[in-house]
Amino acid sequence: MRPDERIRRATIHDVARAAGVSAATVSKVLRGVTTVRSDNADRVHRAVVDLDYRIDPVASGLRGEQRRIIGAVVPDLESPFFGKLVTELESLAEGAGYHMILASSRESEERETDLVARMNDWRVAGCILVPVRSERGSGATRLNDLGMKAVLVDRVSADERFDTVAADNFSAAASVADLLIGEGHRHILLHGATQISKAVRTRLDGFEERARALDPTVTLDHLLSDEPLQTQRDAVRVYLEERQGDHRPTAVFSLSQHSTLLVLSEIRRLGLRIPEDISLVGFDDADWMQTTWPSITAVAQPVEAIAACTMRALLARVEGESTGFPVQNLEPCSLLIRQSAGQSNEEPPHQSQRSSGSP
Amino acid sequence: MRPDERIRRATIHDVARAAGVSAATVSKVLRGVTTVRSDNADRVHRAVVDLDYRIDPVASGLRGEQRRIIGAVVPDLESPFFGKLVTELESLAEGAGYHMILASSRESEERETDLVARMNDWRVAGCILVPVRSERGSGATRLNDLGMKAVLVDRVSADERFDTVAADNFSAAASVADLLIGEGHRHILLHGATQISKAVRTRLDGFEERARALDPTVTLDHLLSDEPLQTQRDAVRVYLEERQGDHRPTAVFSLSQHSTLLVLSEIRRLGLRIPEDISLVGFDDADWMQTTWPSITAVAQPVEAIAACTMRALLARVEGESTGFPVQNLEPCSLLIRQSAGQSNEEPPHQSQRSSGSP
DNA sequence: CTTGCAGGATAAACCGATTTATCCTTCGAT
DNA sequence: ATCGAAGGATAAATCGGTTTATCCTGCAAG
């Protein structure tokens, strides 16, 4: 605003002059190298305060091979899951003395690859990638080609190049199968919307394997698609409309949060009662699921654990402690039983929302 | 992985050598300076491709006063609103040839101030700040003290130091008043949870002013608090329980998304019917509001417009085109009328969820 | 035939840190 | 008294670009 606001930032040399030492000494003091006489260190600290000196992270990283930056690429920033994940990651990275650069691939694999290259331009010490599709995508390939240190997260299974971290989708889905089969359901719809990612496939497999193990005669229908929202919506409606009475599944397992929302809205549009006419279990929990009526039984993912594990793995690689084969980390999920399936352990159904008169 | 993977990155000098020109010339070509003979430019371009050369953004920005980076600080990354906002902003920044550095203040004003200082360390060309509280917070002050170029977004009103961009909370809230008063409600609860930010206050004012203008006798109760979630929850319950029959408000206007969820869950816990016993309008729309039953009437914020306006304003300042007084930008919201209040224009209520028998 | 100037190219300085190679003390051991 | 080693400090090189000041080469004007 003011014309004379060309604020002259203090440099390390200004500090050196003020403290009566060399720039090299200042640098040492600031990075905690111990071979400095304590009286010199004190003078430096005083000068830093006097001049309001702050290290320029850009210049600081220029010389070394890698910079104290961690890159993170996620498929989107609009879902609470990734939002929470990156918030945690940012916090952990800072705690370890790293800056974090964040970018959204917006569910585009092309953009993902580009962003990985861009992270390499920044000479990040390491990179966290949540692939759009799976560990076999071009983002991970690029990561490998560029010789970057990285951890693959969430939409992945084991990989021979990088450590991976994910929710234990397989077991969690299996426990959903336990629940539904245990409740007597023998015809179940599995629904997956949006990206048919590795995670979604794993959930599918986990459910199917357990369900068939428990009862080989169970009928499992699939409705998976990458199509636009409206197309998927229509597909669900047609599916449900075509199957009346005994031909209709008695339960739905939706494999993602988007999917849960979509299925729920179609069930309602058709006037089916939950859970009397049809039960619903969703993978991935959200605040609203506990508040909507009936509340939705869902699998909650261990976001904090995933974040913590990811950062631990990455730092171990970056700081060179860990050099062995890549490891696959699976974090256990928890199944939150509510009203839409299973015996709810929350308060009893709200009478008035349900029926204003009496039968 | 491989021992010899010390990937020798090509520098601008390598390119210069390969093209048989000087580094200065390469730099010119790459930044589109026109005083270069076209045959030289061609050779440079070819060398760039051959060597897979990429500009190091860090070294590149070192000399100049400001770097091609835009900083953004938001209160959280877990809410879809900010998620969408930063996604848009990132996209726009890239389009203009800037990198974007993103950070979450996690609703802490102290952290916000710290992050602003950190953005300054990076010598960002400009900074976008969504303050935790308002334009009077310490983040904005720090921004000003450091002489940074910035735009304040969302939880702000007019400011004499920076351009501001926000949803037109005042008018939108007024239109909610139009709706509720028009529907005959004369006793309304205004509920605000989480951060009582500038935005929330403005919504409150907008509603009250219009409501009282339409009917001076209207009764408006307030329940605003920064308290922990459970305390707020109890407050709502006690409030509703204490007021039976005629003493109970016939409508609630919740001033934020969190607030809507909280109020909704308490209304349900008490077994009140929506909208028969009590109407509900929320500020800030979410996917689930259109799917839950009954669907929730809500004010939708113009995220894209806000993002576009923000980036336009910031770039104008950064690129020195705009030097006048700070301007306040207000983007209009839209009111989505659903089942929880007003005459829904969506499909009729679902019979079966409502009542399984007949009266 | 000189002078002047414009168009282009470039060597060298610069940005602000880190790191290296060197140098100076001081102190203990021989 | 001499030498070596250790402890500290620093000048200078370095990182990879951008910018500046200089320089060269023609060509048109005087």
Image (tube, coloured by chain):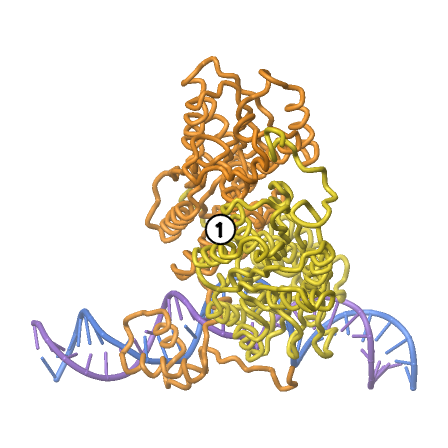
Chain colours: A orange, B yellow, C purple, D blue
Residue on which disc 1 sits: A84
Identify the residue shown where x is 55% and y is 24%: A189
Frontmost residue, A50 versus A22: A50
Residue B211: percent from the left, percent from the top? 69, 65
Residue B352: percent from the left, percent from the top? 62, 31
Rendered-image quadrant of the N terminus of chain A: bottom right
In this view, C23 is above or below B292: below
Label 1 crowding class (10 Å Cα cut-off): few <14, some 14-19, many 20+? some
Q: Quadrant of residue B35?
A: bottom right
Residue A58: percent from the left, percent from the top? 51, 66
Frontmost residue, A52 versus B52: A52
Q: Residue furthest top?
A: A217
Relative to A118, B323 lies left or right: right
Rendered-image quadrant of the C terminus of chain A: top right
Q: Is residue B317 visible?
A: yes
Chain letter for mark 1: A
Identify the residue shown where x is 54% and y is 49%: B267
Q: Is residue A166 visible?
A: no
| Count of numbered badges drawn on the protein | 1
Q: Quadrant of residue B70?
A: bottom right
Badge 1 element: helix
Relative to B27, B182 lies left or right: right
The amino acid type found where label 1 is placed reads Lys
Relative to B87, B270 lies left or right: left
Identify the residue shown where x is 38% and y is 59%: A96
